[in-house]
Image: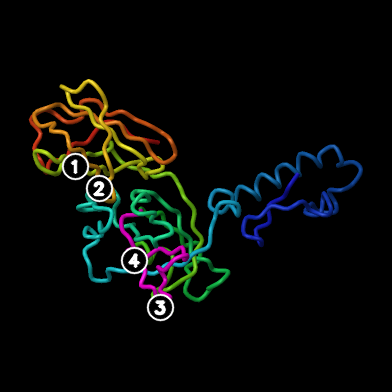
Amino acid sequence: MAICSVTLVASCKEPSEPFALLPKWLIMEKFVPYISIWRFVLLFTTCNLIIEEINAQNWLNGHATFYGVNQDPSTFGGACGYDNPYHAGFGVNTAALSSVLFRNGQACGACYRVRCNRQLDRRWCLPHGAVTVTATNFCPPNNHGGWCDAPRQHFDMSMPAFLRIARQGNEGVVPILYTRVACKRSGGVRFTLKGQSNFNMVMISNVGGSGDIKSVSIRGSRTKTWLPMYRNWGVNWQSRNDLRSQILSFRVTLVDGKTMEFINVVPSAWKFGQTFASHKQFN
């Protein structure tokens, strides 16, 4: 049975002595029947202190900076195409990802748990500092050794999110540990209609679960089959079918394979620019 070691940052190892962490007085003949129980309690308590936040198998190394010091967080939609990330359900805890993580927009909407790595930087990292951010933008490379150049795994975070994990200083760069987590959203998935008569486009936001969308199909009330949509950019999906004056339904598949159908979520009297919230959500 493995015992978690806090000093190894949530790593688990087999102790050389099975009862090394138990007091000597407990390892007496009359207490032998209770050793297994105490051992289980010790293991359960120790491991659960850290297993939720840190798992050495899933956490990866990277770096983080911040941007938008005097900028309205609602304008951080950037390369993902969110008109207003704050109103899209993401709040102010957002980040622009380096190209390795951004994956040409496929990572838009994904959520990451980010911790400042105090083992590497105790001066600037806050104790127990952690924040969950949503990918809403792209941090472009500059091909001169910049933080967002490939193959670096980098998060350029909104300032409110950055200050949850680190102090300002050190030129605004800190080492981090990060991992993918499920997105927790309030309310249902939202669909914002854009485009024109022969070019329908929908921006899909407030997506829970894995958050990042793999594919989308659309169906009008006069359409018998699902019509595939194509990623225009970020979270904007397009169709060249004229679906005006039709009730619209959507089928959305996330990167993790989960699929959900949003039937008749948009009424026939819809207009470009309107947003419609569903009553369904990925979890």
Q: Residue at x 25, y 30 (%)?
A: 227
Residue type (three-letter) at the residue carrying disc 2: Asn
Among the two numbered marks 4 and 1 on one chain, the one whose residue lies closer to the N terminus: 4
Helix, strand or loop status at disc 2: strand
Q: Nearer the viewer, residue 145 or 164?
A: 145
| Label 4: how many Cα within 10 Å (few below 14, some 14–19, many 20+) | some
Q: Is residue 251 above or below residue 168?
A: above
Q: CA distance from mark 4 to mark 3?
A: 22 Å
Q: Nearer the viewer, mark 3 or mark 2?
A: 2
| Quarter of the rendering containing residue 196 | top left
Q: Is residue 125 above or below residue 224?
A: below
Q: Nearer the viewer, residue 183 or 156?
A: 156
Among the two numbered marks 2 and 4 on one chain, the one whose residue lies closer to the N terminus: 4
Q: Is residue 155 above or below residue 2?
A: below
User: Which mark identifies residue 201?
Assistant: 1
Residue type (three-letter) at the residue carrying disc 1: Met
Q: Are dots 2 and 4 in contact, CB under 8 Å? A: no
Query: The magenta stretch spans which residues?
Result: 135-158
Q: Which residue is mark 2?
A: 232
User: Which mark identifies residue 169?
Assistant: 3
Position of residue 256 in the picture relative to residue 57 (left or right): left
Among the two numbered marks 1 and 2 on one chain, the one whose residue lies closer to the N terminus: 1
| Label 3: how many Cα within 10 Å (few below 14, some 14–19, many 20+) | few
Helix, strand or loop status at disc 4: loop
Residue type (three-letter) at the residue carrying disc 4: Pro
| Quarter of the rendering containing residue 270 | top left
Q: Is residue 124 above or below residue 154?
A: below
Q: Nearer the viewer, mark 1 or mark 3?
A: 1
| Label 1: how many Cα within 10 Å (few below 14, some 14–19, many 20+) | many
Q: CA distance from mark 2 to mark 4?
A: 19 Å
